[in-house]
């Protein structure tokens, strides 16, 4: 995935200022693709220079802010990118390398780190479940867009659930 495409997606959902985009990104796509506010602003400049988005001034109490809209060329690029085949990404997690190192060393207790990660995954799972309960209440039919948005959220939920199972199994087999 690329940050420019994540930004185009978010701006198509709702055009906004860079500050609003950064806040929204932290609360939605940021769960699955992290970017700093500085990276987001840098990409907005590139997208504008490439003719994919347009900025317009917006008078506010704090002065003039730029409001970003996706142009037809930006929408076409996002449609093109959405259809490109992509292979699953391999797992790249420092915790897994630490466990291998602890196995080789034979002297390191990684139990505390495993328990910390277990809690982090529990916290993420609770956040995702709260979002699901708020945005996708049972019995409320979803249109295609809502169904796809829920599918993304469900991927995060299943991911966290699987990490929790793995953490419990690892802790039970004596990682401490």
Image: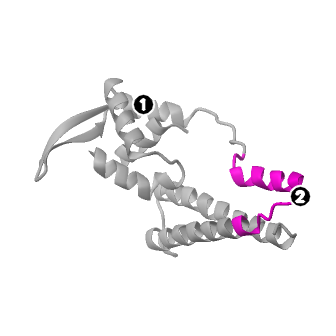
- Which residue shows up at 29% across the image and 49% down it? 19
In x, y percent, where is residue 62? 13, 51
Look at the numbered disc 1 and give the secondary structure of its residue.
helix
Task: Decide if residue 158 is on the left or right side of residue 107.
Answer: left
Identify the disc placed on residue 76: 1
Residue 92 position in % (x across, y down): 70, 46
Query: Left of 115 or right of it: where is 144?
Result: left
Q: Foreground: 70 or 127?
A: 127
Residue at 60%, 66% in the rendered image: 120
Residue at the spot of label 2: 106
Residue 60 in the magenta stretch? The answer is: no
Q: Nearer the viewer, mark 2 or mark 1?
A: 2
- Residue 52 showing in the rendered view: no
Q: Compare residues 22 and 54 and report the one nearer the observer.
A: 22
Give the magenta range: 91-113
Q: Position of residue 15 (x, y in %)?
A: 29, 46
Q: Is residue 87 left or right of residue 51?
A: right
Look at the image and tell me in which quarter the C terminus lies: bottom right
Residue positioned 86% across, 60% down in the render: 107
Q: Give the Cα separation between the discs numbered 2 and 1.
A: 54 Å
């Amino acid at each position: 995935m690329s940050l420019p495409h994540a930004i185009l997606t978010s701006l198509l959902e709702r055009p906004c200022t860079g500050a609003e985009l950064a806040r929204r990104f932290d609360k939605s796509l940021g769960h699955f693709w992290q970017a700093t506010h500085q990276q987001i602003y840098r990409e907005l400049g590139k997208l504008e220079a490439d003719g994919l988005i347009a900025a317009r001034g917006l008078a506010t109490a704090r002065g003039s802010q730029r409001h970003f809209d996706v142009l037809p060329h930006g929408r076409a690029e996002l449609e093109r990118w959405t259809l490109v085949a992509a292979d699953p990404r391999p797992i790249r997690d420092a915790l897994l390398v630490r466990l291998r190192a602890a196995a080789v060393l034979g002297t390191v207790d990684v139990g505390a780190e495993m328990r910390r990660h277990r809690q982090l995954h529990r916290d993420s799972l609770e956040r995702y479940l709260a979002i699901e309960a708020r945005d996708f209440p049972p019995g409320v039919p979803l249109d295609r867009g809502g169904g796809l948005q829920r599918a993304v959220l469900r991927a995060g939920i299943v991911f966290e659930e699987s990490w929790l199972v793995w953490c419990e199994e690892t802790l039970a087999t004596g990682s401490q």
